[in-house]
Image (spheres, grey):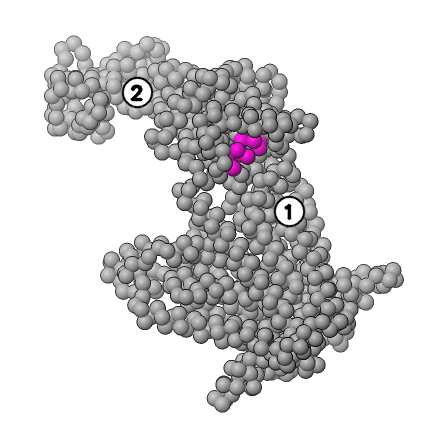
Amino acid sequence: MSIEVRNIRKNFGSFSALNDVSLDVPSGELVALLGPSGCGKTTLLRIIAGLETPDAGSILFYGADATAREVREREVGFVFQHYALFRHMTVFENVAFGLRVRPKDTRPSDAEIKRRVHDLLELVQLDWLADRYPPQLSGGQRQRIALARALAVEPKVLLLDEPFGALDAKVRKELRRWLRRLHDELHITSIFVTHDQEEALEVADRVVVINKGKIEQVGSPQDVYENPVSPFVYQFLGNVNQFNSHVHEGEAKIGDLELKLANHQTTQNSAGLAFVRPHDIEIDKQARKNQAGFAAVVSYVHAIGPLVRVELQRSGEKDLIEAELTQERFRELAISQGQNVFIYPRNVRVFLNN
Amino acid sequence: MTTRKNVLPGFNLSLGYTIFYLSLIVLIPLSAAFIKTTELSLHEFWAVVSTPRVVASYKLTFGASFIAALINAVFGLLTAWVLVRYTFPGKKIIDALVDLPFALPTAVAGIALTAVYSNNGWIGSWLEPHGIKVAFTPLGVVVALTFIGLPFVVRTVQPVLEDLEAETEEAAASLGANRWQTFYKIIFPAVWPALLTGFALAFARAIGEYGSVIFIAGNMPMVSEITPLIIITKLEQYDYAGATAVAVVMLVISFILLFAINGLQWWLSRRNGSAL
Amino acid sequence: MSIKVPSQYSSYQAKVARSRATSESLWVRWSFIAIMLAFLTLFLIVPLVAVFTEGLRKGFDAYLAALIDPDALSSIKLTLIAASIAVPLNLVFGVAAAWAIAKFEFRGKSILITLIDLPFAVSPVIAGLIYVLIFGLQGWVGSSLIDNDIKVIFAIPGIVLATIFVTFPFVARELIPLMQAQGKEEEEAGLVLGASGWQILWRITLPNVKWGLLYGVILTNARAMGEFGAVSVVSGHIRGMTNTMPLHVEILYNEYNYAAAFAVASLLAILALVTLVLKSLVEWQSARSAIQNEQNFS
């Protein structure tokens, strides 16, 4: 483990930002801290960096307790959300800063600094911008310079706070892939904070879902997407339909529909919430003989792109159900707005209310 | 962000030095004034600060300061408006010159205004035939206080006018408002807290002013003698307790004004959604 | 009562053409401009010009003689001494106060800011008075000072103290809002990169606020050299000894030596004009970099 977080607590006044958080980050992994704004993910990142002191708990770097270690001695690279580039210094001086402020005996020679800064600028493919000032750069360029600056001090871990938050959608996608490639090249243990599930799922080796100061789930992107452990994770990672249901001895009833569940075998007469992803909603024009479903009316069809989004209204209910079909299936069905259809949910996951 | 414990270094040193230096230069010396007045009984204190001559000086100081601040509110708003909205030759020079009263030593301002507004001065000689005497009258005090308060209104209103969005005025125009309606329904409500702040700043500065006033005022007791001069006169007669008593009255009023102004500015920055 | 950095964007704004719907008719515009110019002429320009014409009334030789008079020279010297002590001290204070206030959260912060503003609200005459109360003959520490043959009041230390008092808040008032607006991310970045506190201050914070700092120093200096009321109370008006330039102007004026008074005053007026020019240069410079940042960051 290169980073271990042990029972961290942090309150801001009466607000509990982190409530008994523990986390292991294996060496060389790229980990995403994912959660809504205000969930405590940035606070956790800043505590790991030493920019914030926890009220309780400890941080271990490579097995050694670093809780009391000062920021300067933690050997972390930190990329700030708004980059925090030094406005009055050139790109070169920004990247060189961490080397120049070292005490004389450990400071590299000027020639060495020059060489290392240019190597880093080449790594982030911006060597040609060395003499510019930060205000003269685009958002994406600033982001890469901030990364080069953080890497210049050869940190043991790299921490990134919403690294793509301030960029527009297109640049964001590009930089996302670039960061992934860079990480594969350098293999430096990295943690980044994001509120964008797509970003976390695409880039990270491991996703840590945080909500209200607690870790909800840790796992590979596939794992957290396919097997969410809580209603929150279900809702936060992608679109999902919710149904009120009644659970009794391994069976869930949603209206007339009865579903066999893999769990909740001993549950007696409880209320629960059933979750189904839009692509797990099947649509048919006719009622199926030996499968129970809902009658519904098509209320809206959005057919642009590879997937067709269909909004349906369950008979006798107010809320809308969202379904996603392939273009192929959509043409086969040939449904349109106002049509009566039947829907059949697959892969239903039920969580009991409490 | 408000209660985060901060990892930046130097907090104890910088705050400690700030409080030490503040106490040494400002707080301890100021407290001396309040402690000195305790030498007087309440009755004596009241007797000193309520003699007719002192009361006349309050009337002059506060009255003239109020009128001067009012003049500055009107012309300062106009000046700020012209500097923000219009272009004309020499605008940059005029803009820079508005700060002259901040930069020009008050004694220089005092003798210059006296020279200009006295009977044989450039402006005074032109006013005299109309029966208007400025120098060595309370009117002269108003002129001097207008001079020293001039930048305050301009400099508080100017940034607010600059930040006004043209769209809101265009919206008003598109909804059928004429220019005057747009001004008093859209622009003035946005500007008036700044105007009030500028007025209060000019007023507060004026009541303490000494250098520019004493030359032009004539300093006739009961007529054109300002309160700061009363303090000086008492000091020159070695009446330290008396001087301090009058000073304490002024200090208390100044502090109230200072708190009011800070409150105004806080409110103003709240309204504008940005720190001034 | 801080002095706002005016019209950061005025030149930029002026380039944005205003549409007909949001501007006044030509005659309204020009009459507004005319009223403003008349007002400023009466109150600013005429008195300023008068300083120079009055100073030169008896010819250039008399003007020069008034300036190289030994008493005038010693007053110039004393003014420079007072400013050269007050400005650095208040500069160090301003940086320390701004660092504590802008970069940290603590209880009583708004009270501290108000207390720093106090000297703006205090009449200069009272500023002088409080030092007389402490260091004067009957003052708190006055008698023990006299026993040790140290003079504060009616001597240079008193003048310096009074000058420090009246210029106390200028640098702090310029720096606090500036450093607050800049946040502390850059300082944190410096910290993570291994910089010490002093390195952060010298290499990151101060370069970022250099224009505001310079602006504060210019204002402090102008006020320090021109202060009259406070200095007048503590100086004792000893010619050639404890007279600063403004006090020397007063003495000459009260002796009806108008031309000489205005000659020395004209030096102070030149100082004021230089201050205004420097101030404008600093403003344009900082507005230029602000606009540059604005355009590129948006």
Q: Which amino acid is tagged 1?
A: Ala
Specify whether residue A96 is painted magenta.
Answer: yes
Would you identify the image quadrant in which residue B161 lies?
bottom left
Q: Residue at x 79, y 63 (%)?
A: C152
Q: Position of residue C205 (x, y in %)?
A: 58, 42
Q: Position of residue B243 (x, y in %)?
A: 71, 71
Farthest residue toward the front? C61
Q: Give the letter of the chain under mark 1.
A: C
Q: Is residue B210 visible?
A: no
Distance CA(mark 1)–CA(mark 2): 58 Å
Q: Position of residue B162 (x, y in %)?
A: 41, 57
Farthest residue toward the right? C147
Indicate which label's residue lies in the foreground, 1 or 2. 1
**Foreground: A154 or B147?**
A154
Q: Is residue A260 left or right of residue A147?
A: left
Q: Which amino acid is tagged 2?
A: Phe
Q: Mark 1 highlights which residue?
A: C96
Q: Residue at x 16, y 9 (%)?
A: A290
Number of other residues with Cα within 10 Å of mark 1, as a class: few under 14, some 14 to 19, many 20 or more: many
- Whether residue C7 is situated above or below residue B48 in the rendered picture: above
- Whether residue C38 is situated above or below residue C169 in the rendered picture: below
> Residue B3: which numbered mark, if any?
none
> Residue A275: which numbered mark, if any?
2
Q: Give the letter of the chain under mark 2.
A: A
Kindly indicate whether the residue at mark 2 contacts the one at mark 1 (C-beta within 8 angstroms): no
Q: Is residue A234 visible?
A: yes
Per the picture, the main secondary structure of the magenta-coloured stretch is helix
Which SS class for mark 1?
Answer: helix
Q: Residue at x 68, y 82 (%)?
A: C256
Magenta range:
A90-98
Would you identify the image quadrant in which residue B84 lies?
bottom left
Q: Residue at x 27, y 23 (%)?
A: A241
